[in-house]
Each structure stands twice: as structure tokens, then as C-alpha cells.
Amino acid sequence: MQSITITAPVTHVLDVQNLSVSRSGKLIIRDINLSIKKGEFVGLVGPNGSGKTTLILATLGILKAQSGHVSIYGHPPMSRGLNGKIGWVSQAAANLPKEIRLTVRELVRLGTLNSGNLFWGFGAGKESVDKAIKMVGLEAVEHVDIARLSGGQRQRAVIARALASNADFILLDEPLVGVDRDSRNSLLKLLDLLCHNEGKTIFMISHDLTAIRQTAHRMIYLEESIRFDGPSEDFPDLDKLAGLRGIEPVHKPDGTHHDHSKEGE
């Protein structure tokens, strides 16, 4: 009798196990364990130099891990099985040199951009381009040069490029930098709609704790290792956050100074 093998469905978009990464001989992140399910909006926060971008780049396979394991949709990073499934928007994605003259539509159609500058995905067809431009609300400026757009519009354009490749897993590194308040709120609303209405999974780095806390389902606080991972509404307040970082108070509640010289006596 012929046996039948049943393959269990992949329940997690991203699985990271015991991941450690060093850069220039220095350990940047260590023993990272996390998983992200389909349809989650996860915010990644932490101080400058805490390893946020390193974690994303190692997740994508752009940086080599010292140890540990990463799988995306059950595949290793950079494998052919992931073609078109991942949209990567880096910090530099919207800052194209002024001498590069591209319209919004041309940028969204362009399929061979450097993965270190923008994101993966190749050969988006007309229907995909039309849909992506409409999803980000840039129909009125689709034939306008990128250089003439506001910071918020440029961010929408590079997000549209990721969407045009039909990516289901979108990773963004500080997309709110350099945009005004209205553009920030508009971008966050767009990402929320992509998550809830389009079923996209979003993993986003942001320095704006207030903004990401109001939008993401879940927050991860990273400082070399993961110090917090849970629902956004449970994210610690500033005092607890200082405790997580090992920062001791300098002032007493009455305004006087703590005398740390006597500690340990």
C-alpha cells in the first residue's frame, strides 16, 4: 500500500531561532527568538545602535548570521521559493539621487533595483502596477518625477513598488523619517489598511514609539537581545523601559540627587 505524506501548513511567515550576528568583530544581536504570523503588524523599536536594522538584514539574508536559523514561509532567506513574496523598504529607499529622473509609475514598474537600496520583486505587470499605485493613493501623481514629490509621497511610491511585486510580507526600516505629521498619519493608516484589508504581514522599524504603538498589533523592544515582545497596549511606560535598559534614576521624586557613592556599602 502506497504511503501518503501530508505536509503541515506553514503557520508562521517568519521564524527566527537563536540568531546572533556580529559586525566588524562586535556582537550586535544575540540569541534572538521570534515568530510572526500572517496578518500581524509588528513594530520593532530600540535605541540607536541596538541592532534593529541588523536584525532585519540578517532576516533577509543580506547579512550573514554568526549562529542561529531563519525561515520565511518555511524557506531559507534568499531562496527561489520567496521570489515576489517579500517587499523590503530600506531607510534609503525614498532618497533617490536627484539626477535619477523617474516618475512614480516608472519606479513602481522597475524590477531590478538593488536590494540594499529598495526591495525585492521583479517584472511587475501593468495590472499589478495600476493596483499598487491605487492602493497607496498616488494616481494623481503617477506621471510626476519622484524628485518633485513630498517625503510622504516618496515613501508611498516605494511601498507601492513592494506591493506591485505582490509581496505578502513587507519589511520597512524607518519609513516615518523625514515626513511631516500629516504624511506620517497617512502612511500609518495605509499600512494598517494593507494589513487588515489586504492580508499583508508587516514588520516595521520605527524610532517613533508613540506612532508605532498606536498602529502595530505587537511591539518588540530590541537592545542587543529582545527585552520586550508583546501586545502594543502592554508596552512598558518610560520608567519600566528605563529599567529594561538598566538605566538608574539620577533624581529622587523630591528632586534631590541619589547618592550612588554609598551603594554597596
Image: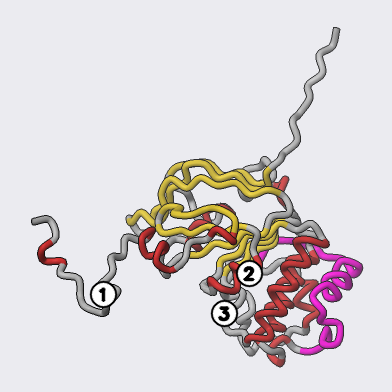
Is 254 rendered above or below residue 140? above
Which residue position holds label 1? 251
Looking at the rendered image, the disc whose residue lies closer to the viewer, 1 or 3, is 1
Sooner in the amino-acid sequence: mark 1 or mark 3: 3
Could you tell me which residue is drawn at 43 percent across and 45 percent down? 31
Dot 1: what SS? loop
| Residue displayed at 63% across by 82% down | 96
Within the image, what quadrant is residue 101 found in?
bottom right
Query: Farthest residue in the left direction?
Result: 265
> Sequence-wise, which precedes: disc 3 or disc 2?
3
C-alpha distance separating marks 1 and 2: 30 Å
Residue hosting label 3: 177
Residues drawn in magenta: 119-144
- Ranked by sequence position, the earlier of labels 1 and 2 is 2
Local SS, label 3: loop
Is the N terminus in the top left, top right, bottom left or bottom right quadrant? Answer: top right
Q: Which of 56 and 33 is in front in this view?
A: 33
